């Protein structure tokens, strides 16, 4: 008998979150948080909301936030579903929408939570290899004579590669698979990707997922959302209401709403991250790294002469954390979050020392 007393738990291979060490003065470039704080208006809104937020139940549908997002994206509030981070939104999507007789298709290298949810919800999936440049190839997601997808999910820009897929290519995938839900996870889209939100009114099978954790610097507040046809959103509400009728607390709703309204701060911080990413890409290239062109707030880079795990360890000894994945095909890469200009400069100095 399994020590878990359950065949469901026994077979699970859980997601391993990036480290959050309790150590001061670390340069933390391992989990793609923003190096800049959230909008000061979001912080003020959270402070102002505190009294009522703690005393009262939150709105079960998070309608105020749905309305603010609907206005920003030019859709209706009933086309938006909010949850505790896009991880929770994705959990509901997998649970409600992605289990079919035919397998779910996803890239072989992508956000590693997807296979975990497949394990949890008993969803069969097929991994489709990225091309030799680590890009998603739309042709591979079109129905084949011998196979069609039950559903499709990919991140765009993809993670941890950082590579984007052009909107026209996303549309080809969505249009060619009208019989199945296509989920586009746009956690990093604000740093240079093209959003598929522009397509949701045209394609009832498309669901776009975004987050406040990266470009809005609110990872700790836990706010994510999905945008799509009202029928898909209604399906997510039904599943959510089966076990957690309060997706977001009032503090999260207040902070997220104020953040959406502060477009100027959002643009300014995204632009700073993009400028630092381009600078870091140049600096790493000068040190001999191959850096994949990134449309995100991180870079994915390998050095032809140095083992990636060894480099991550040497950086750690200098109090700099980066992410290394011990996975086939990408185990020679480091994923490095874009920090402040000063943090990136320290990283480059440390790498120069380590490479000798
Ligand atoms: N999707 C992708 C591709 C991610 O990298 C992450 C961050 N780990 C998430 C979703 C989840 O982000 P959050 O739950 O903070 O919204």
Image (cartoon, rainbow, N blue to C red):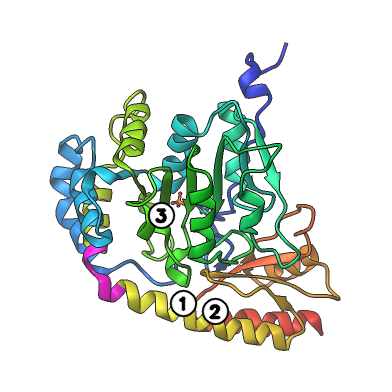
Residue at position x 71%, y 68% from top?
Answer: 317
142 relative position to 328: left or right: left
Q: Which residue is mark 3?
A: 210
Residues rendered magenta in the picture: 260-265
Report how far apart the C-alphas of labels 2 and 1 lie in the structure: 6 Å
Q: Residue 225, image x and y in percent?
A: 36, 48
Q: Residue 301, image x and y in percent?
A: 70, 72
Regarding residue 212, the answer to whether it shows in the image is no
Regarding residue 185, the answer to whether it shows in the image is yes
* Marks 2 and 1 close (CB-CB < 8 Å): yes
Label 3: few (<14), some (14–19) or many (≥20) C-alpha neighbours in 10 Å: many
Relative depth, front residue between 296 and 144: 144
- The verdict on residue 101 being magenta is no
Q: Quadrant of the C terminus?
A: bottom right
Q: Please state the total of marks drawn on the protein image.
A: 3
Q: Which mark is residue 184?
A: none
Q: Which residue is mark 2?
A: 277
């Amino acid at each position: 008998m399994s020590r878990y007393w359950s065949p469901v738990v026994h077979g699970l291979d859980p997601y391993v979150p990036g480290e959050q060490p309790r150590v001061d003065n670390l340069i933390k470039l391992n989990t793609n948080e923003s190096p800049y704080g959230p909008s000061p208006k979001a912080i003020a809104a959270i402070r102002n909301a505190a009294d009522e937020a703690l005393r009262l139940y939150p709105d079960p549908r998070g309608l105020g936030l749905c309305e603010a997002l609907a206005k920003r994206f030019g859709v209706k509030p009933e086309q938006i579903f909010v949850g505790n981070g896009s991880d929770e939104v994705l959990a509901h999507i997998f649970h409600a929408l992605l289990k079919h007789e035919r397998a779910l298709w996803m890239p072989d290298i992508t956000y590693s939570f997807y296979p975990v949810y497949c394990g949890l919800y008993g969803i069969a999936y097929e991994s489709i290899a990225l091309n030799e440049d680590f890009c998603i190839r739309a042709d591979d997601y079109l129905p084949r004579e011998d196979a069609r997808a039950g559903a499709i999910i990919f991140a765009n820009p993809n993670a941890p590669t950082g590579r984007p897929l052009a909107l026209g290519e996303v549309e080809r995938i969505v249009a060619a698979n009208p019989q199945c839900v296509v989920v586009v996870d746009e956690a990093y889209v604000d740093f240079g990707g093209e959003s598929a939100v522009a397509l949701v009114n045209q394609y009832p099978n498309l669901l776009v997922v975004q987050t406040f954790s990266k470009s809005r610097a609110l990872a700790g507040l836990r706010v994510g959302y999905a945008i799509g046809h009202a029928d898909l959103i209604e399906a997510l509400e039904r599943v959510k209401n089966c076990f957690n009728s309060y997706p977001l607390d009032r503090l999260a709703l207040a902070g997220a709403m104020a953040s959406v309204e502060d477009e100027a701060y959002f643009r300014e911080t995204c632009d700073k991250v993009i400028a630092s990413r381009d600078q870091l890409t140049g600096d790493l290239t000068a040190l001999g790294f191959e850096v994949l062109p990134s449309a995100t707030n991180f870079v994915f880079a390998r050095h032809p002469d140095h083992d990636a795990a060894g480099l991550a360890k040497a950086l750690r000894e200098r109090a700099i954390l980066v992410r290394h994945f011990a996975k086939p095909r990408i185990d020679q890469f480091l994923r490095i979050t874009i920090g402040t200009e000063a943090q990136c400069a320290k990283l480059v100095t440390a790498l120069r020392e380590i490479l000798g």
